[in-house]
Image (spheres, rainbow, N blue to C red):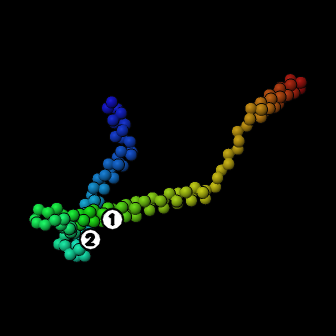
Amino acid sequence: MLKGFKDFILRGNVIELAVAVVIGASFTAIVTAIVSGVINPVIALAFQADDLAAAGQALGEGADAPVLAYGLVLSAVIQFILVAAVVYFALIVPMNYLKKAQFRKKAEAPTVVEPAPPTDTELLVEIRDLLQAQHNARYKADNE
């Protein structure tokens, strides 16, 4: 059981995934800071709110009335779009470029055509000819 766990942990994919999670968590902190520090204040001005998260519509009268907080949703959507854009442009586009370059390199490389292996009949004919030549050489050496 421990051997299986050790094999699982030492696979390259698990380690790469762990690195991706750590970098993703750090990156999320950066995106959150940009969204809450730069983008949300600009959008809050458009909705005339102190904070985008505070933007919303009261659904009733009084202090205890529920609030439709569309600012929270809008903030989350903006953050998602920013993360998706960075992942696309920082990871997907370069990987696609590298794959295309590698494909082009393979397509441009000269293809080496290996000769087909001899058939059984061709091998038997070759063996027969070698044996005949060997027999003839012995016969000639004995008669001289």
Q: Residue 137, labelled with which disc?
A: none
Q: How many numbered dots are placed on residues in this image?
A: 2
Relative placement, left or right, of 134 versus 27 is right
Q: Residue at x 77, y 32 (%)?
A: 121
- In the picture of the structure, the residue carrying the numbered disc 1 is 82
Mark 1 touching mark 2, by CB under 8 A? yes
Q: What residue is at 48 percent from the left and 61 percent from the top?
A: 97
Q: Quadrant of residue 129?
A: top right
Mark with earlier residue (1, 2) = 2
Q: Residue furthest top?
A: 142
Q: Residues within 10 Å of mark 2 (few under 14, many from 20)?
A: some
Q: Determine whether 112 is above or below 30 in the image.
A: above
**Residue beneath the point at 86% across and 25% down:** 139
Secondary structure, mark 1, is: helix
Query: Which residue is the extreme one toward the right?
Result: 143
Residue that lies at the very extreme toward the left in this rendered image: 63
| Displayed quadrant of residue 61 | bottom left
For the residue pair 69 and 50, the one nearer the viewer reads as 69
Residue 110 rendering spot, x and y as whole percentages: 64, 55
Give coordinates of residue 82: x percent, y percent. 33, 65
Asked if residue 87 shows in the view, the reply is yes
x and y, in percent, of residue 132 in the image: 83, 28
Residue 39, numbered label? 2
Mark yes or no: residue 33 visible. Answer: no
Q: Residue at x 26, y 71 (%)?
A: 39
Q: Which x, y percent locates residue 108?
A: 61, 59
Q: Is residue 13 above or below residue 42?
A: above
Quarter of the image for residue 9 reads top left
